[in-house]
């Protein structure tokens, strides 16, 4: 999933990690990628995803992103995903 972020702060924001947490507290670490830090008072993007088989989470979930050098986090609640449709045999 690609997310657009705004950074209202005075320092660049660099993604260090990401996780999905479901309503039961089950947490799945996500693979996270960012081409360049989000500049101060600017906009940027990050990409997060599941490596391997997706876990069966009880969504809606909370998506948490945290920065490398500092206390600033991004938290998005009520995250859901479309039901995947498998081909019939």
Image: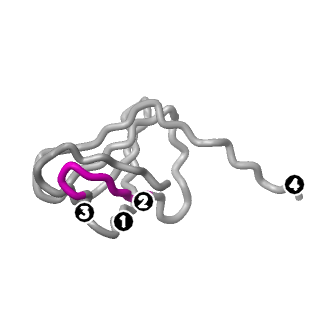
Q: Is residue 38 left or right of residue 83?
A: left
Q: Residue 18's x, y, as percent?
A: 33, 53
Query: Gap between marks 4 and 3, in whole Å?
Result: 43 Å
- The structure residue drawn at horizontal position 54% and vertical position 54%, both measured from the top left corner, is 54
Residue 57: percent from the left, percent from the top? Answer: 51, 41
Looking at the image, is mark 2 or mark 4 nearer the viewer? Answer: 2
Residue at the spot x=51%, y=34% of the render?
Answer: 59
Query: Which residue is tagged 1?
Result: 33
Query: First in sequence: mark 3 or mark 2?
Result: 3
Q: Magenta stretch containing residue 42, yes or no?
A: yes
**Element type at marker 4?**
loop
Numbered-mark total: 4
Foreground mark, 1 or 3, reads 3
Magenta-colored span = 39-48
- Left or right for 8, reference 89: left
Quickly name the residue at label 2. 47
Q: Mark 4 points at which residue?
A: 88
Q: Mark 3 highlights which residue?
A: 37
State if disc 3 and disc 1 touch (CB < 8 Å).
no
Spatial separation of the CA atoms under disc 1 and disc 3: 10 Å
Give SS at disc 1.
strand
The answer, for residue 85, to whether it is visible in the render is yes
Q: Nearer the viewer, residue 52 or 66?
A: 66
Label 3 neighbour load within 10 Å: few <14, some 14-19, many 20+: some
């Amino acid at each position: 999933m690609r997310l657009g972020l705004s950074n209202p702060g005075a320092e660049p924001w660099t993604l260090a990690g990401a996780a999905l947490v479901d309503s039961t507290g089950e947490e799945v670490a996500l693979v996270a990628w960012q081409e360049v830090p989000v500049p101060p008072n600017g906009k940027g993007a990050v990409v997060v995803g599941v490596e391997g088989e997706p876990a069966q989470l009880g969504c809606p979930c909370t998506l948490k992103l945290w920065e490398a050098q500092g206390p600033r986090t991004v938290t998005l609640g009520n995250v859901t995903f479309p039901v995947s449709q498998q081909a019939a045999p």
